[in-house]
Image: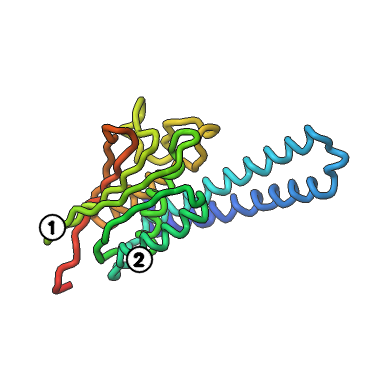
Amino acid sequence: MKTKNQISDLSKKVGHDLKSPLRKIRQFAELMMLEYSDVLGGDGEIYLDALTESTEEVSDLVENLLIYVKCLTETPDITKVSLEEVIEVVSAQIYLKFGQSVTLEDQRLPTVKADQNMSLLLFTHLLENACRFVALDTSPNILIKLDETNESAVIYIIDNGIGITGEGADKVFDPLMRLHSKSDFKGSGLGLAICKAICEAHGWDIGFSNNAQGGTTFKVSLPVMQPSD
């Protein structure tokens, strides 16, 4: 049986070997578009656009697979992490990616013992999911709430999206699990699997429920820092 280090090393090598030819395919497709667009005509440009888009999808999948394996195999670098600051960084990225139509409200969040980079990844994927899986012509509306005791904190990410229902909903945290067509909602199919792997690496719990008024609530349960920590 391979060790975690061996699996991590293998995934990095495979990732490198996959990303290199994908990069070349995209570069040559872009060069063909620049040099031969007048020869290719309308259909040829459409084919090249489709080729470039597919290459980017596979590159995104490879990148997220590498992140997923890293979260499964590497030990978190535990430090004091302000989740307040994490949400501030992630929120700025969300507005850049999805635009100012996104409404994001958050409460004061605690400082916890966690891996800084993994914490950023966790909330990036949760908030991006909330922005991505919304009905057509609906602006994402996200509320982050905190329920805290002396020993634990439960963070709720409440959205106004399409919800998580139907066949396979109970496996939404499985890698490459899709409930919708890629043509309807883009994504690698690994975002929630990465979230699950990060929470398991920290000993946290993650789950979801559908809101009565529509949308989804994701729940992350974790211990809070004590004065002696």
For the point 57% across and 43% down, the residue is 57
Residue at disc 1, secondary structure: loop
For the residue pair 101 and 155, the one nearer the viewer reads as: 101
Question: Label 2 vs label 1: CA separation?
Answer: 21 Å
Q: Can residue 136 be seen in this view?
A: yes
For the point 52% across and 32% down, the residue is 184
Sooner in the amino-acid sequence: mark 2 or mark 1? 2
The x, y position of residue 118, in whole percent, is 37, 59
The x, y position of residue 113, in whole percent, is 25, 66
Residue 103 numbered mark, or none: none
The type of residue carrying mark 2 is Glu
Reading the image, the residue beneath label 1 is 149
User: Which image quarter: residue 16?
Assistant: bottom right
**Number of numbered markers:** 2
Residue at disc 2, secondary structure: helix
Q: Is residue 83 left or right of residue 133?
A: left
Q: Is residue 229 left or right of residue 207?
A: left
How is the protein colored in the picture? Answer: rainbow
The type of residue carrying mark 1 is Thr
User: Which image quarter: residue 153?
Assistant: bottom left
The x, y position of residue 6, in whole percent, is 42, 57
Reading the image, the residue beneath label 2 is 85
Q: Is residue 6 visible?
A: no
For the residue pair 155 and 39, the one nearer the viewer reads as: 155
Quarter of the image that includes the C terminus? bottom left
For the residue pair 199 and 14, the one nearer the viewer reads as: 199
Q: Is residue 52 above or below residue 198?
A: above
